[in-house]
Amino acid sequence: MASAVPQIQLPPLKDSAPYVAAVDIGGTFIKVGLVNREAQVVSRLEVSSEAERGFAHFVKRIGDAIEMAVQELGLTFDDVAGIGVGYPGTVRAKTGLVSGSPNIPGANGSNFTQPLIDRFQQAVIVGNDASVAALGECRYGVGKQYGADDLVLFTLGTGVGGGIVIDGQLVVGAHSQGAELGHTVIDPNGPQCGCGNFGCVEAFCGTAGILRAAWRRLQAGRESLLWNYIREFQRDELTPKMISQAAAQGDEVAIEIWGEIGFYLGLAAVSAVNLVDPEVIVFSGQIAKAGDHLFGSIKRTVRARCRLNPWPVENIVPGSLGDDSGIIGAAALVLSRLS
Ligand SMILES: [Zn+2]
């Protein structure tokens, strides 16, 4: 359909250049890595995003960080095949316009991609951070271990992100705003989600939902090791990590909490199985470090509720790229297009 918004003209990728510049944007930081053609990270740098100083400043800061990374290695942009970016929100591929980006002030409606193309005269390929992580895990992490071209990934943190890779390619849809698996509704009468809807996976399994599950039990007067953390710190400093630590020590309440969260994530995984039947389902991010108490519950739920066809629950696994998943995923956006 014709659009009044100018379309991005992407400069060609430099097919023979040895490196890709990869950018991983978080709420408060910008990480830039130079990645070789084998998807190995050869250099990393991290700067604060200073997003509060406005969107134009934020984009300039990303450009400065890319330039710094290239210069630090004694390279020029002739050595860079293209720039890949994992963005915490939606950036439309056709126009470069940002939407669904609550964490970066002034971002919605602004153009993210065009200023970077103008500055570097390089191809700039942008994806949602969770989609990018899915592509990275598929091509260079878990997917490689399993020989899998079809993979679904959930990122667990403050929110719940999602990514779908089919036949080795990302599925992001007509408006670049898929695959928001964290906003799959699993309870129409559930609590309100940050997105405005009710009963999304994220409303139960984002950090706030997990802490709510914990408080419900503590306020009911249950005995738990978690009380020790609360006496030691402020009540509002209870974190998912503490719940994991308590669960690792056999705390019944903490184990129950991961059981409940795993049940909800399992429902989300059942939907993913019914939707695209992936070979592997990956859960990554801080909260995925909760380990077997969480994964056991996810697998039990999928085993019990995938009724039409059985699905191999042993293929539900944590991510394998760790802290580099954002950088390697962003690089994968470019590497997957190089010949
Ligand atoms: Zn939602």
Image (tube, grey):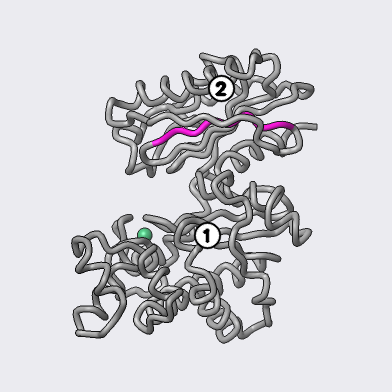
Residue 132 appearing in the image = no
> Residue 325: percent from the left, percent from the top?
58, 46
Q: Is residue 156 above or below residue 90?
A: below
Residue range corresponding to the magenta coloring = 29-36
Residue kind at label 2, given as amino acid type? Ala
Residue type indicated by callout 1: Phe
Q: Within 8 Å of ligand 1, the CB of disc 2? A: no
Report the front residue among 104 and 67: 67
SS class, disc 2: helix
Q: Nearer the viewer, residue 288 or 338?
A: 288
Quarter holding the C terminus is top right
Q: Give the x, y percent position of residue 103.
A: 33, 42
Q: Is residue 332 above or below residue 119?
A: below
Residue occupied by mark 2: 69
Which residue is disc 1 drawn over?
154
What percent of the width, then of the height, locates residue 8? 55, 25
On screen, 149 above or below 199?
Answer: above
Residue 6 at x, y percent in the picture = 49, 23
Please rate how many residues cluster around mark 1, counting C-alpha atoms within 10 Å: few if below 14, some from 14 to 19, many from 20.
many
Q: Is residue 123 visible?
A: yes
Q: Residues within 10 Å of mark 2 (few under 14, many from 20)?
A: many
- Nearer the camera: disc 2 or disc 1: 2
